Image (cartoon, grey):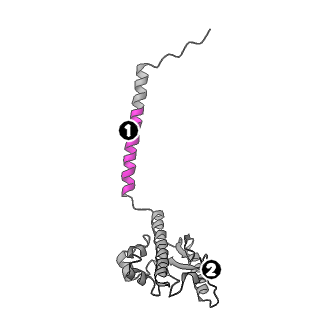
Amino acid sequence: MPAPPNPPLSRLAVGFIALLCVSAMAGLFALNQHLNEHFRSEPPSERSRRLVCGSNLKGIGTSLRIYQAEHGLLPDAGFRTLVDSGAVALRQLNCPSSGKTVEDVEKDLHACYVLVAGNGSLWSELPSPSDTIVAYERDNHGGEGGHVLYADGRVEFVRPYAEVLRQVEESMQRLKEPDAKPQNP
């Protein structure tokens, strides 16, 4: 004998399932609203501040290259030349993780970032572009690390900050070498 067919769902069961679906959708909507309000009022994370910081340094590198293309040399007065020419805005010289204000940066243009190369040299004359640091950030991330702008144009977050300082020292030695061979990045 064949098995009897499944009985159709009763109207009560269908209504109950529909009620569950509507309740679940309302709960998800309320949760979404709560999460949106929570994250909107939360301050930016260190990760997003680090992203802005790296972007600032990349922009500084681009401004240095543009300055050299227009004037034939890298600026000899560092960030002051870039700010006075309008190539870099003060907010670009401020790492959001530093806790400094734009007014602090206006008083000390090297409050957050330090220019290593420059002084009237050519970008193409910088030795070992993949290893030579053009600019770096001060310890704005609690010793965890810092962004570095290399002569080949890339920006990296180097960990820990002691490694940033070691690489800066090596770059400064390389830039002082009289027999450093010019290389195009």
Image position of 128 with respect to 158: above or below:
below
Q: Which mark is residue 88?
A: none
Among all residues in the image, which is located at the extreme top?
1
- Asked whether, in this view, residue 34 is left or right of residue 162, the answer is left
Q: Which mark is residue 26?
A: 1
Quick one: label 2, few (<14), some, or many (20+) residues within 10 Å? many
User: What span is colored magenta in the figure?
Assistant: 21-40
Q: Distance between the residues labelled 2 and 1?
A: 60 Å
The residue located at (39%, 81%) in the rendering is: 85
- Asked whether, in this view, residue 7 is left or right of residue 34, the answer is right
Question: Could you tell which of marks 2 and 1 lies nearer the N-terminus?
Answer: 1
Q: Amino acid type of disc 2?
A: Ser
Task: Provide the residue designation for mark 2.
Answer: 128
Among all residues in the image, which is located at the extreme bottom?
178
Give the x, y percent position of residue 7.
50, 16
Main secondary structure along the magenta-highlighted residues? helix
Q: What element carries label 2?
A: loop
Front position in the image: 148 or 84: 84
The residue located at (43%, 23%) in the rendering is: 13
Front position in the image: 113 or 98: 113
Contact flag, marks 2 and 1 (Cβ < 8 Å): no
The residue located at (56%, 12%) in the rendering is: 4
Image position of 61 with respect to 172: above or below:
above
Residue 30 sits inside the magenta stretch: yes
Q: Amino acid type of disc 1?
A: Ala
Give the x, y percent position of residue 20.
42, 31
